[in-house]
Amino acid sequence: MEELARMSTEELLEHRRLKFRSMGLTGVKEGAEVAPERKRNMKPSELNAPKFADLESEIEDLKKTILEAKVPWDPLTSQKLEKLEDDLDQEMTKAFISMGLIEQIESLNLELAKSANPDQALNEGLKEKADKLLHEFKKKLSRPGAYLGLKQKLQKLEMVSKLIEMKEKSEKVKSELNQKLSSDVKAKMEFLNTAREKLSEGNEIDEKLVQEVEVAKEKLEEVLKAANLQLLGTKKLDVDNEFREEMAKVNKEIKEEIEKVIEEKGLGRKIEELKEEATRDSTSEKVKKLEAEVKEVISDALKDSPLKERLESLRVKRSEEVLEEGNVPVDNGRW
């Protein structure tokens, strides 16, 4: 959402003009009636949205690739970044089709193509059409629970952009820091690394060595503080507890919403019937049918609930926290 909001009208149109993929005009428009026989074969759009586990896995993979890559980027990293942009572009195209805006986009593309110089500022008529189209797009995109796949990809692209910025900054600081560090400071760093390795191997260190480690650590912290950096482990964020508490709160609200739907839709008797049938044979066709009916009613009632988008945003935010560490490797690449 923020990625699109930062674009001007001209930038958004140019983005569409250069990268638009023609997918035909047979998509289903939002709010339009769909024939029953076709509707039965359709899946809800949310099923196409990446699950949180997949999204988190993709982000971790990108994080690992970017952090281990060298700047300028190697072909593998560039390929993954290009794939992310292509996926986002396809998701945006599908969203335009679903929103019923595809004809307006094509019309604007044609008018832009006919323009003598596409780089010139838009005339008032075209600008008014573009502004209206952009407003309609943002309005539909902002609906709770709608276009989760596109929203997740936009958030992922924003996170990756931050990660790339952090990587490039760290490489620059690493280079500058290695030039400025004296041999004495580098020796203290090596001393700390040796002490850490001894501890990790289970070896005991005497009191004198402990004191020397503390002195070396203080000296290094002074040097890194001057460079607006910190040693790994000197700052700990209690984000896990906060995340768990927020997730528990949202899950509780979702449970309350479901109980409210059951009461309003009169599903109590059907659920009791489902329980009775399940005790006899949990794999029977009747149990499967009752289960599907209950799930469908609850799903339809909650599809536009703001809690759904809130839950997804909370999960994506959890993945975004991996980008907030400002540790920079120096000299031998250790953190």
Image (cartoon, rainbow, N blue to C red):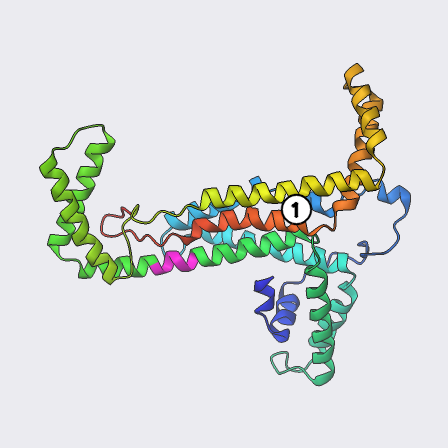
Q: Residue at x 56, y 55 (%)?
A: 155
For image coordinates 56% across by 39% down, the residue present is: 53
Q: Residue furthest bottom?
A: 124
Q: Is residue 78 above or below residue 108?
A: above
**Residue that sits furthest to the top in the current view:** 280
**230 or 102: nearer the eye?**
230
Decide if residue 167 is on the left or right side of residue 93: left
Expressed as whole percent of the image width and height from the top left, the position of residue 30 reads 80, 56
| Residue 64 in view in this figure | yes
Residue at 14% across, 32% down:
205
Neighbours of disc 1 within 10 Å: few (<14), some (14-19), many (20+): some
* Magenta stretch prevailing secondary structure: helix
Image height of 102 relative to 150, above or below: below
For the record, the magenta segment spans 164-169
Does 234 appear above or below 267? below
Q: Position of residue 279 (x, y in %)?
A: 77, 17
Q: Which residue is mark 1?
A: 49
Residue 312 drawn at (x, y percent): 61, 48
* Picture quarter with the N terminus: bottom right
User: Would you identify the image quadrant in which residue 127 lies?
Assistant: bottom right
